[in-house]
Image: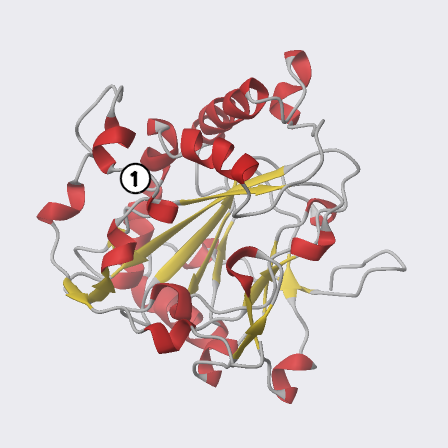
Amino acid sequence: MIAMTSDMPEYLPLKVANALLPDAPALRAQMEQDGYLFLRGLLPPDVLHAVREDVTGVLQAIGWIRGGPDRLAAQAQVLPCREGEPRYFEAIDRIQRLESFHSLAHEPALLQLMTLLLGEGAFPHPLGVMRLVFPDNPEVTTPPHQDFRNNQGTPRLTAAWIPLADCPLDSGPLAILPGSHRSGVLPLSFHLGPGNRQAVLPEELATARWATADFCAGDVLLFPALTVHRALPNRHPSRMRLSVDFRYQPAGEPLTEQCLQPHFARQSWDEIYRGWRSPDLQYYWHKRHYTVVPWDASLHALPEEH
């Protein structure tokens, strides 16, 4: 059990799955039981450090964080902004053009793990998500939700949540409701956080214990599209939480067209690739096997009263 301060609840610890590597049946059984896999130290810290250098370079250039020796700490020096604001897109558009950001989804250790879990031909969606979480902005903390309604396609879609540095509880890591993937697709209601939607939890989930951990650089949390998850508030007095979401799917299974586009589709892939050092990962999904299915707007719609 993870002990909290008096104003924070108690959480279950995430089960560490490293001992199951490289046993594919054991990994799949654990995922089926709990709805997540938590791997300590899966990624090389120097690779994450390089991505964080590039991301904080963008944030410093637009004035969001302090420069100099404090840059990598991502110490915020502006008022928070939220997804959808022009100031937010000023940062996201530049980060979407970073080769290091997109390359992280293809790290060998991640691809090997996804092959064990999802089978040969498993691949990351080109849509990668950068999370820029300001301190002391709890109203827009990512609420409980499932990824299926936002992405659709195959329910076997599997997310990898990766902090770009150590992310202890007070910095707002992700939390999971173990076993929630067995509850089916849940209804939606409005929320101020990313996507403006949250899952409406049935009583057995609303009263269940969340599981989380103090994350270290290199740790990876995996979960399928029906697992309920949320972010904890970033309670650090000054540091932003920088993390990435990448999603992987088995070969041959369905996906929607938006999963083949850059996040928010504000730029073309040609614009994003301009200035990259290597063409190796450009349009890589053209060589992969999948089926494009229509987006079902009803799955993403809020009730009329919302």
Residue 147 appears anywhere in the view:
yes
Percent position of residue 228, x then y: 53, 70
Q: What residue type is labelled 1?
A: Pro
Q: Residue at x 28, y 46 (%)?
A: 126
Q: Which one is nearer the viewer's eye here, 120 or 21?
A: 120
Percent position of residue 54, x then y: 46, 23
Question: Dot 1: within a 10 Å radius of its alpha carbon, few (fewer than 14), some, or many (20 or more) residues?
Answer: few
Residue 186 vs 18, above or below: the answer is below
Side (left or right) of 170 relative to 223 = right
Side (left or right) of 172 relative to 15 = right
Q: Which residue is drawn at 58% across and 70% down?
A: 190
Q: Which residue is drawn at 35% across and 63% down?
A: 151
Q: Quadrant of the C terminus?
A: bottom right
Percent position of residue 202, x then y: 60, 86
Q: Which one is nearer the viewer's eye here, 210 or 81?
A: 81
Q: Which one is nearer the viewer's eye here, 241 or 34?
A: 241
In the displayed image of the protein, which residue is found farthest to the right? 6
Q: Residue at x 35, y 68 (%)?
A: 28
Q: Which one is nearer the viewer's eye here, 2 or 59?
A: 59
Quarter of the view holding residue 297: bottom left
Side (left or right) of 142 relative to 283 = right
Residue 225 appears anywhere in the view:
no
- Say which residue label 1 marks: 108
Please say which color scheme the image uses: secondary structure
In the displayed image of the protein, which residue is found farthest to the top? 68
How many discs mark residues in the rendered view? 1
Quarter of the view holding residue 231: bottom right
Residue 268 vs 145, above or below: the answer is above
Q: In which quarter of the image is the N terminus?
A: bottom right
Secondary element type, mark 1: helix
Percent position of residue 77, x then y: 72, 26
